[in-house]
């Protein structure tokens, strides 16, 4: 495989957990508590966005509260705040005043004050859907343990209007809250949300992402495919691609990544991951095209540049691999692996002196880099630097097991240095371990043994 499959670099699947939670929330059109329209039932601003309710008779409202709500409709929260404080403190049982105060404080960025007001709204009238939902959302936002209590309560009450949409949001929010602590109950909450809004892909996306995290890939695949059927342009494409990459089902991953790259040609991650999958399939030319596209969109990503360099190397484009690795090694001079990879590209081009220099740099940076010592021995042998060959092989032997070819390199080096005794020992070790895998070198070793060993 030419490239490592870093699935985490794909654009993250939307789960609703990272939805915007800007405290300056616009009041939904027509959502005044004394009006006739609904709460913001749809979750277009994320399941963590608080709502307004709409079920209070005009005759039950004071002029002060009505004025405050008029200010809320105009998003003039600073003007509404003192009026609501006065109205709520004048009548502690007025749950609407407390609710509107909670909404206003949240809009002003006063989260703690918002929570306190919502608590009093729930205490004044415990069975109001919107009060419980907003309190649960605020507590969830601040990671307070009783958030679950109020979100669960919200699922049991009827919203003032657009009931299905409101309950959908409550179940979805509960699911997001429970993911880490109670994943099975989170999945059950997502299932309830899906029943309430069967045409919305979000519950399936959230369930798919949770199942993927739990490595229940078959179940995750099922959820993602349901989401994709509801919305062909959804982030389910990303989820499916991730699953197939993790399962090394590269053909399937390629299919969905191609769709993702076609839908979002401006996203570097889609091209990069497609390039990595194509490289894993051995489709190096196509992989190079996609990785080049990814670099154009994200030119500063060293990991993508490294993937492209490796794909050049695997494709036999040695001059391009050399150029790419040299640029990386120059930018990251303390990275032993980059110097080693540059050296291997130089070996391919038979630039043995330059390769030897890069391998020397690699082992200087990382004195325990066994593989680099082996390549250094080979480059030194090609440069006829036989003492260095032996020295590199001896260090390698302390770090990695001997291999037939290391015995041959050592034997050849001793042979050139006319140390025939040590050469013979290593030629015998080579012949005994090669077992026909290196026929040319085995023939050479046997003939050298005839020449250098004393006649018995």
Image: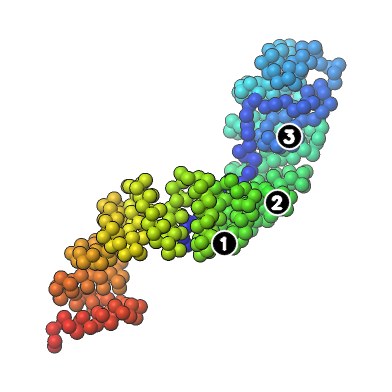
The reply to whether dot 3 and dot 1 touch (C-beta < 8 Å) is no
Q: Is residue 407 toward the left or the right of residue 230 in the image?
A: left
Mark 2 secondary-structure assignment:
loop
Above or below, comparing residue 222 to residue 99 in the picture: below
Query: Percent x, y for residue 435?
Result: 33, 80
* Above or below: residue 364 compared with residue 124: below
Q: Is 119 placed above or below 442 here?
A: above
- Return the residue at label 3: 154
Residue depicted at x 73% and y 34%: 154
For image coordinates 78% across by 43% down, the residue present is: 196
First in residue order: circle 3 vs circle 1: 3
Q: Residue at x 13, y 87 (%)?
A: 455
Residue nearest the observer in this picture, 93 or 344: 344
Residue 240 in picture, x, y percent from top left: 62, 54
> Which of pointers 1 and 2 lies earlier in the amino acid sequence?
2
Whole-angstrom CA distance, mark 3 to mark 1, is: 44 Å
- Pick whichever, 432 or 295, lies toward us: 295
Of the image marks 2 and 3, the number of the one nearer the N terminus: 3
Question: In the image, which is nearer the foreground, mark 3 or mark 1?
Answer: 1
Q: Mark 1 points at which residue?
A: 250
| Residue identified by numbered label 2 | 232
Find residue 148 and report its horizontal and vertical position in percent.
Answer: 65, 36
Distance (Cα) linking label 2 and label 3: 32 Å
């Amino acid at each position: 495989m030419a490239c490592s499959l870093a699935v985490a670099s794909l654009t993250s699947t939307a789960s609703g957990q990272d939805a915007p939670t800007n405290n300056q929330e616009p009041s939904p059109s027509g959502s005044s508590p004394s009006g006739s329209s609904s709460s913001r039932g749809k979750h277009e601003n994320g399941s963590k966005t608080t709502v307004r309710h709409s079920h209070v008779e005009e005759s039950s409202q004071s002029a002060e509260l009505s004025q405050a709500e008029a200010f809320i409709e105009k998003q003039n929260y600073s003007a509404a705040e003192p009026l609501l404080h006065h109205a709520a403190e004048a009548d502690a049982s007025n749950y609407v005043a407390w609710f509107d105060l909670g909404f206003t404080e949240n809009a002003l960025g006063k989260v703690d004050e918002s929570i306190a007001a919502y608590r009093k709204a729930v205490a004044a009238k415990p069975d109001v859907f919107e009060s419980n939902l907003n309190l649960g959302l605020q507590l969830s936002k601040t990671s307070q343990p009783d958030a679950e209590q109020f979100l669960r309560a919200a699922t049991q009450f009827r919203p003032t209007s657009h009931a299905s949409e409101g309950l959908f949001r409550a179940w979805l929010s509960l699911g997001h809250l429970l993911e880490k602590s109670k994943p099975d109950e989170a999945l059950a909450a997502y299932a309830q949300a899906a029943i309430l809004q069967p045409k919305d892909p979000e519950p399936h996306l959230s369930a798919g992402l949770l199942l993927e995290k739990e490595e229940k890939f078959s179940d995750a695949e099922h959820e993602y495919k349901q989401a994709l059927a509801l919305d062909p342009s959804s982030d389910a494409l990303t989820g499916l691609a991730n699953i197939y990459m993790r399962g090394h089902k590269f053909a399937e991953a390629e299919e969905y990544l191609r769709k993702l790259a076609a839908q979002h040609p401006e996203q570097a991650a889609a091209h990069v991951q497609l390039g990595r999958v194509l490289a894993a399939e051995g489709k190096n030319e196509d992989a190079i095209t996609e990785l080049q596209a990814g670099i154009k969109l994200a030119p500063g990503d060293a990991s993508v540049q490294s993937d492209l360099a490796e794909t050049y190397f695997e494709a036999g484009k040695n001059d391009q691999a050399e150029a790419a690795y040299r640029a990386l090694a120059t930018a990251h001079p303390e990275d032993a692996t980059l110097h080693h990879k540059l050296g291997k590209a130089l070996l391919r081009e038979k630039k043995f002196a330059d390769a030897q220099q890069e391998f020397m740099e690699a082992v200087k940076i990382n004195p325990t880099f066994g593989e680099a010592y082996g390549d250094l021995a080979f480059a030194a042998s090609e440069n006829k630097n036989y003492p260095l060959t032996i020295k590199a092989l001896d260090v390698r032997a302390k770090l990695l097991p001997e291999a037939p070819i290391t015995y041959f390199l050592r034997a050849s080096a001793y042979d050139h240095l006319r140390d025939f005794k040590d050469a013979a020992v290593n030629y015998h070790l080579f012949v005994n371990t090669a077992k026909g895998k290196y026929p040319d070198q085995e023939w050479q070793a046997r003939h050298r043994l005839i020449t250098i060993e004393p006649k018995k």
